[in-house]
Image: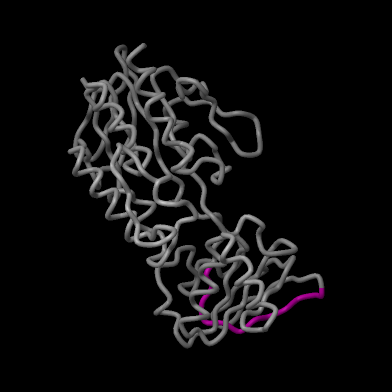
Amino acid sequence: MKDVIIVGAGPIGLACGIAAQKRHLDYLIIDKGVLVNSLYHYPQNMTFFSTSDRLEIGDVPFISHNPKPTRAEALEYYRRVTAAWDLNVNLYEGVNRFEKTKTGFVVHTPKGSYPTKNIVMATGFYDLPYLLNVPGEDLPKVTHYYKEPHPYFGMDLVVIGAANSAVDVALETYRKGAKSVTLVIREKEVGQNVKYWARPDIINRIKEGGIKAYYEAQISAITSKSVKINTPEGAVEIKNDFVLAMTGYQPDFSLLESLGVHFQEDEFKTPLYDEISMESSQKGVYLAGVVCGGLKTNKWFIENSRIHAPMIMDAILKA
């Protein structure tokens, strides 16, 4: 029987594995995807908001060749951390279900069943996009994920959103040869939390007319040739080839719910947990990283949730 199984091989899941290893706990990290799966699915040219030192785990230095590290540098770094610590990680192995037992839990996957005394949920939030829930959202021209600008060369684009992802996508596709880029923004302005070097850039591109923007606008329907939006000035139809809906993502609460974890009665569906031990309302189930914020996915980042790893493993040792 394992002392702890960590669900999620993102940076915080890896940090939990390192903390367990330092304390000589018998652990296993499992993930349904690749190592640091959420980071892998970020846009290829994505740049972090944080400096590299704030992304470090396991006392392994993260040396970046840029003022802010890139996605490629982060992927290489976390591969190096995993190898340096020789972490016990099973990738491409998702959780089917959890079973509660007298001595703890059994974690069932397509590849095996693992008895464990404790579980750490360190799952991310990149799997479930916020949907627009409008006619035509299921058309092939619509995507909630963005990888690189090349497919959109010479195309008319509608980008939905006002946060970092939407701004990055709009700027990069504009500069890499999109025929036109139109931003549809629900708010009155570009998000205040957009990266400090990108916000003035997108505002200036809008002012000069390189990128068109509709504020306080809502998508009403998507067709094969256009997007229909409602604006304060009335209905507008925009001819376009692709819709890049950068509307954000939400955690999958189904695994937490299946474990019997309770949630606060708030708008963010915040899981209940002890802020010292990180133990949830279900004894033996601990929470780490972004999942602690529920739907408020901008509360916990790598840099401010790395501390969850030693807190959890110290609590498990004392239990």
Residue in the picture at 52% in, 23% down: 275
Residue in the picture at 24% in, 49% down: 79
Measuring from the top left, give residue 260's x and y in whole percent. Answer: 46, 25
Measuring from the top left, give residue 223's x and y in whole percent. Answer: 58, 77
Residue 311 falls within the magenta-colored stretch: no
Disc tally is: 0
Residue in the picture at 54% in, 37% down: 293
Quadrant into which the N terminus falls: top left
60 or 236: which is nearer to us?
60
Q: How is the image coloured?
A: one colour
Magenta part, dominant SS: strand
Residue in the picture at 69% in, 72% down: 229
Query: Is 301 on the left-hand or right-hand side of 5?
Result: right
95 or 66: which is nearer to us?
66
Instruction: Please say if 222 is above or below 87.
Output: below
The quarter holding residue 204 reads bottom right
Quadrant into which the C terminus falls: top left
Instruction: Please say if 305 is above or below 239.
Output: above
Measuring from the top left, give residue 173's x and y in whole percent. Answer: 49, 77
Instruction: Please say if 107 is above or below 132.
Output: above
The quarter holding residue 237 reads bottom right
- Which residues make up the magenta segment? 233-244
Instruction: Please say if 20 is above or below 191.
Output: above
Query: Is 302 on the left-hand or right-hand side of 11?
Result: right
The quarter holding residue 164 reads bottom right
Query: In the orientation shown, which residue stands out farthest toward the right?
Result: 233
Measuring from the top left, give residue 147's x and y in whole percent. Answer: 40, 67
Residue 238 falls within the magenta-colored stretch: yes
